[in-house]
Amino acid sequence: MSADHLGQLRREGRIVIVGASLAGLRAAETLRAEGFAGELTLIGDEPYEPYDRPPLSKSVLLGKASPHRTDLPHRREIDAKWRLGVAATGLDLSAKRVRLADGDEVEYDRLLIATGVRARPWFKEDEARLDGVCLLRTRDDADDLYQRLKAGPRRVFIIGAGFAGSEVASACREMGIPVTVAERAGAPLVGALGGVIGAVATGLQTENGVDLRTHVTVTGLEGDATGRVRAVHLSDESVVEADVVVVSLGSMRNTEWLNGSGLGAGPRGIACDAGCRAFDFRGIVTDDVFVAGDVARSPHALFGYQFLSLEHWGNAVAQAQTAAHNMICDGADRRPHLWMPAFWSSMFGVNIKSVGVPPMGEQIMITQGSLAERRFVGVYGYKGRIIAAVSFDNTRWLEFYQRQIERGAPFPVEFPTVDRRPEGRPVDADFPDPSLPTHGPMITLSGYSPADQQLVFHPARH
Amino acid sequence: MRLVVDLNKCQGYAQCAFLAPDVFAMHGEESLIYNPHAPEEQRERLARAVAACPVQAITADGLEGLGERGTGSAQEAHDVR
């Protein structure tokens, strides 16, 4: 692009951001901070200004915050035109237009797609409609679930023991509500952290009074005559009576609106290059469509250039900033998105944090502390180097391990560590076969993971 | 006042929980629970918490602080050999 053209874009161009949540907001702020003076439009399907989601499963369910009061602070004025409560329904790449659910069309010079993910609903639609069957993704979901928990249900049943399901279970126990958790795999959190850590999570749940059922699937939800859920049927033929069922089966990427657009978008997200530019369906990079946040998947140099989709709060912020910067810059000034994956969770009073990509790990060694005390750092190794680390109530050490991942430090860990115990030998990290469906990990390795063998390519009509 | 804590950065120093206990509370040894919407009368305490956070993890409307910024690798490309 010529300097003239770029200058004109920065002065009077039209930038449209589809997705008005964390990534969309931070991108808008970055565009203005870096001098974009043109027209900025944010489109969001929810009728709310950008709000923060992590508190919804934590402080909101604990009654420490209102579900409708988690709006994100703004870092600066963004002087944007907001189109809230109206979903984008289509994209015309050649005419550079976004179609909206109300029939309107919005033209752009540069587009940022940050449509994120939504909760995967219960797969039987009639059962999903039963009163008392809940999801947890939006603030309306959180409001509904909180009201139901406050009403003192006899038992809450949670389908799926990933982070979200486990956090809900933790909140229930704190409120003194009986709770059953069903997990297809052998332990909670195994998709994200493997079986060694999953065993610690099992202990956490059972000691806190959760009725944890593993290696089972839910076969059906049973309603009463008034359309309220009353029981859950399991694959081991047991039946659990419950009046609230929380479906916590991971998420689905919001890409359906791009079907037929010609963009490289599908159930795994929207593929983009390291500069956040979207690929079209031929694998050719576009130069006016950018992607950020949960819906994006992009190659990462630290992890074998595999395409990573990261459903991480920090990734949404970092990728939005990089995408926004690159949208109003020329080649040499552009930056790659090489954010170190990191996430946190807290459940049953324990702080769980991770850096790197644990599901790539073949082995794990506990370098500090002890699994039995639930206060430790575990380091994951992949082909002789450190690929990830996880901490339980030991977050202050993680930054050190992040540096080790960045420099490709050898695994098994060679350096001495504080509080090393005899248990600190490398063992199999015990991740489930990635080609088997689980509740859905928060990191999807979609470059050349073994699960790719399960993918069938269905060319769409473009 | 809207606020958000970058919990990737938070290391549980608990300065905020001492300085603005009606907004921030520790939950267990190092988990932080906070109210993302602090009442206006908490502004001064919140400002102290934002300033005192050793890892500058708190962003709040109209208060100076690094907040989500300066997350190291989040900002800069690293030389990955």
Image (cartoon, rainbow, N blue to C red):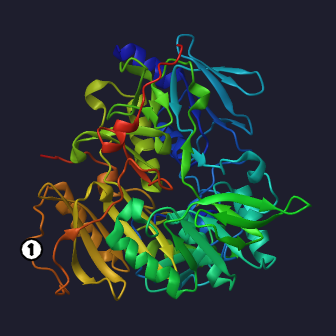
- Residue A9 percent across, percent down from the top left: 47, 21
Q: Please tell me whether residue A450 is drawn above or below residue B57 in the rendered image.
A: above
Look at 30% across and 37% down and name the residue there. A335
Q: Position of residue A342 (x, y in %)?
A: 37, 59
Q: Chain of mark 1?
A: A
Q: Nearer the viewer, residue A120 or A304?
A: A120
Judge whether residue B44 can be spotted in this image: no
Instruction: Please state which of residues A234 and A24 is positioned toward the viewer in this rendering.
Output: A234
- Residue at the image point whose x is 59% and y is 39% from the top: A19
Counting other residues with Cα less than 10 Å from the Cα at mark 1, is it few (<14), some (14-19), or many (20 or more)? few
Asked whether, in this view, residue A78 is left or right of residue A283, the answer is: right
Of all residues, the one furthest to the right in this rendering is A226
Q: Is residue A235 left or right of residue A9?
A: right
Q: Secondary structure at mark 1?
A: loop
Image point (82%, 59%), residue name:
A131
Count of numbered labels shown in the rendering: 1
Above or below, A139 relative to A316: below
Does residue A303 appear to the left or right of B26 in the view shown? Answer: left
Q: Is residue A323 above or below residue A237?
A: above
Q: Which residue bears the numbered disc 1?
A: A415
- What residue is rendered at 66% in x and 51% in y? A122
| Quadrant assignment, res A361 | bottom left
Q: Position of residue A334 (x, y in %)?
A: 31, 32
Res A57 seen here: yes
Residue A127 screen position, x and y as percent: 75, 53
Residue type beneath disc 1: Phe
- The quadrant the N terminus of chain A occupies is top left
Q: Nearer the viewer, residue A89 or A191?
A: A191
